[in-house]
């Protein structure tokens, strides 16, 4: 059995209408690393792209139940990058935490994690510091990982280079532990210490997992943890 990996759908760009998408690099990455991907879609009958976040109503019980039916199919959850954080992102994250579903957050997905149970609180990157949004370079800056972190135990490296595609950075979280920092001090990796695999990274492993050992090890462990959950569910049934 291959684990089922739910990928959270994204608004393509702020203001776009009638589009909920994923970048195909995420789908290919999951397939090639051993998972079966499917798209997690939100339940509200609204235009998520055109509606301001402050104008989106809280999820009703029926809407929450629709998402839960999708999440119960997940052995793992991928929370990808994007441009707009939405209320269902936080509902999905909360469910994953409470049910210990392996979850990997990438770029904006990590920012969802960092803002768990608080108002969205990101800061724009310093224009005079390192440029953290560079689309045409494989590696942009270095990252240092704490050696007592789960992330270090997975990748086996405390200092390495990463790509970078973000305009905003997160501040320290009350729930997640910051375990990785860029050379200019921005938080680049976080983890929730009470789950088996609940990690967010600011860089994009889907772009270089075929050639970059750090990205490959991270993704392989994510799929491995999802496989363990998948096998356990099969035994339980």
Image (cartoon, helix red, strand yellow):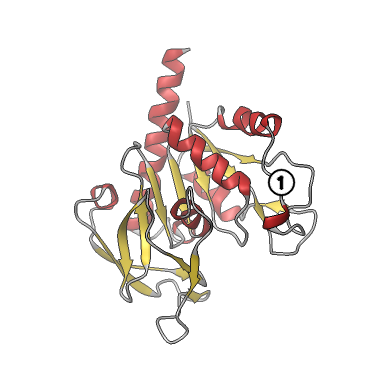
Q: Is residue 142 left or right of residue 163?
A: left
User: Badge 1 is on which residue?
Assistant: 57
Q: For the point 65% across and 28% down, which residue is it?
A: 65
Asked if 99 appears above or below 151 in the picture, the reply is: above
Asked if 103 appears above or below 208 in the picture, the reply is: above
Horizontal and vertical percent position of residue 189: 36, 58
Q: For the point 49% across and 65% down, which residue is it?
A: 122
Residue projecting furthest to the top: 237
Q: Is residue 47 left or right of residue 198?
A: right
SS category of the residue bearing label 1: loop
Asked if 104 appears above or below 186 in the picture, the reply is: above
Horizontal and vertical percent position of residue 190: 36, 54
Q: Quadrant of residue 169?
A: bottom left
Horizontal and vertical percent position of residue 87: 62, 48
User: Is residue 101 something one can see in this rendering?
Assistant: no
Q: Is residue 219 left or right of residue 61?
A: left
Q: Is residue 41 left or right of residue 160?
A: right
Q: For the point 72% across and 38% down, which residue is it?
A: 43
């Amino acid at each position: 059995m291959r684990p089922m990996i739910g990928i959270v759908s994204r608004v393509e760009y702020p203001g776009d209408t009638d589009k909920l998408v994923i970048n195909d690099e995420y789908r290919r990455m999951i397939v090639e690393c051993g998972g079966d991907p499917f798209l997690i879609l939100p339940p509200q009958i609204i235009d998520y792209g055109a509606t301001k976040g402050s104008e989106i109503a809280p999820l009703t019980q029926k809407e929450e139940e629709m998402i839960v039916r999708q999440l119960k199919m997940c052995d793992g959850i991928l929370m990808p990058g994007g441009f707009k954080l939405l209320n269902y992102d936080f509902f999905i994250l909360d469910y994953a935490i409470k049910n210990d579903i392996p979850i990997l957050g990438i770029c904006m997905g990590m920012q969802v994690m960092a803002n768990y149970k608080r108002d969205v609180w990101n800061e724009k990157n310093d224009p005079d510091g390192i440029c953290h949004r560079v689309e045409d370079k494989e590696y942009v800056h270095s990252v240092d990982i704490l050696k007592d972190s789960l992330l270090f135990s997975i990748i086996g490296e405390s200092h390495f280079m990463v790509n970078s595609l973000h305009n905003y950075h997160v501040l320290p979280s009350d729930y997640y532990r910051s375990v990785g920092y860029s050379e200019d001090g921005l938080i680049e990796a976080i983890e929730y210490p009470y789950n088996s695999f609940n990690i967010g990274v600011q860089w994009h492993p889907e772009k270089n997992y075929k050639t970059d050992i750090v990205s490959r090890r991270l993704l392989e462990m994510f799929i491995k943890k999802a496989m363990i959950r998948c096998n356990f569910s099969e035994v339980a049934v």
